Amino acid sequence: MDLTPVILLVVFGLQTAIPIAIAADGELVTEKSGILNIGIYGVMVIGAFVAATADYGTGLSLGKGSAYFGLLAGMAAGVAVNFVFAYLSTKIHVDQVIAGIGINIFAVGITYVLLQRYYLIDGTPLANTIPSLFTIGGLSQGVALKISPLMAAMFILPVLVYFFLGRTRLGLHIRAVGESPKAAEAAGIDVVKTRIVATALGGALLGMAGAYFTVDFNPNFTPDPTGSIIPGFIALAAVIAGGWKPTYVLGMSVLFGATVGLQYVLSLPGALIYLVTMLPYIVTVVVLGIASKRLRPPAALAVPYKKE
């Protein structure tokens, strides 16, 4: 029995889930502090662009290591963008939804302008990619599948996020300000500072998720490299459907990733292929509809807070 189709489905499903799961972990940390960031897509795009340019710019001096440098640069860009978002939301008290939309629009515009100014309009030059963790060979038709180190990170991060939020002082402070900022302030916790730190930390993972597309999946940046709504807003859906619990969020991310990966594995005739393309969105809506009956978000999520 040829298991190649099954292996392809599993690998492509997990590969597609990588940016969704990592971005969802970042959004989870942010939302636990009471900040709702719908600018996930924008942060990922900027992270992807910065990673690609850093990778290409250091290719000669760092060799294969430039891909890892690009990954770190993308994470740093995610921290910077999310810090700006947090500052707007907590210090200036801009509506969080409006600020998130603004970041999405800004990201598309600034990356397009920079591409036009410094590179080709259809993308940056090819650069290095992160070496694979290992390769699955021996499949039919000589197919060999490379497994990314970020796939391992996808499974490790939820464990780290769980212990960070539940076992560290900062993590407990983040959860406290997300549930009751007034009570947290009365206990001596700086609500604004904690929310800014949480949002910045979440930005590092959003930047990593965006960088995956340009230093791992594909070694250059093209306009809209993250496939529009798929990884960004589905990551947001994964956080909600997962009930703001790291392990459940990972499960939802893998589920959504598998539905996206189907289109790369199945060879269907005519209109059926379009149905498979629609499947990630259909599954997202259905899962959110079912999960909505048991949801318990952080009590102060998206609620502005002003120190009295």
Image (tube, rainbow, N blue to C red):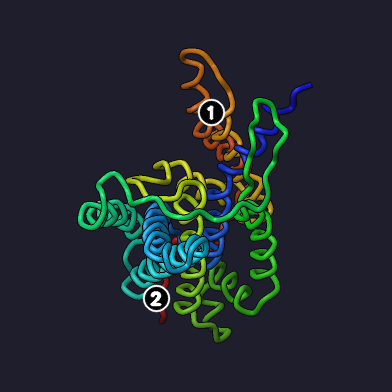
Tag 2's secondary structure?
A: loop
Q: Residue furthest left?
A: 117
Nearer the camera: disc 2 or disc 1: 1
In which quadrant of the rendered image does the C terminus lie?
Answer: bottom left
Q: Residue at x 65, y 33 (%)?
A: 8
The amino acid type of the residue labelled 1 equals Gln
- Residue at the spot 35% in from the left edge and 46% down from the top edge: 222
What percent of the width, then of the height, locates residue 43?
Answer: 40, 58
Q: Tell me which corner region of the image, top left, top right, bottom left or bottom right, holds residue 255.
A: top right
On residue 177, the disc is none
Q: Give the x, y percent position of residue 72.
A: 49, 67
Q: Can residue 106 be seen here?
A: yes
Alpha-carbon span between mark 2 and mark 1: 47 Å
Marks 2/1 in contact by CB < 8 Å: the verdict is: no
Foreground residue, 50 or 28?
A: 50
Q: Is residue 301 visible?
A: no
Question: For residue 122, what is the image quadrant?
Answer: top left
Answer above or below: position of 57 versus 119. Answer: below
Give percent across and percent down for residue 226.
Answer: 42, 46
Q: Image quadrant of residue 106?
A: bottom left
Query: Mark 1: which secondary structure?
Result: helix
Q: Is residue 247 left or right of residue 94?
A: right
User: Label 1 crowding class (10 Å Cα cut-off): few <14, some 14-19, many 20+?
Assistant: many
Q: Locate the N terminus by quadrant.
A: top right
Residue matched to label 1: 263
Query: Image point 43% across, 61% down: which residue?
Result: 55
83 on left or right of 94: right
Q: Position of residue 120 (x, y in %)?
A: 26, 49
Q: Amino acid at mark 2?
A: Lys
Residue 58 in the figure: left or right of residue 292: left
Taking depth in this image into account, of 222 and 172 the one nearest to the observer is 222
Can you identify the residue that label 2 sits on? 306
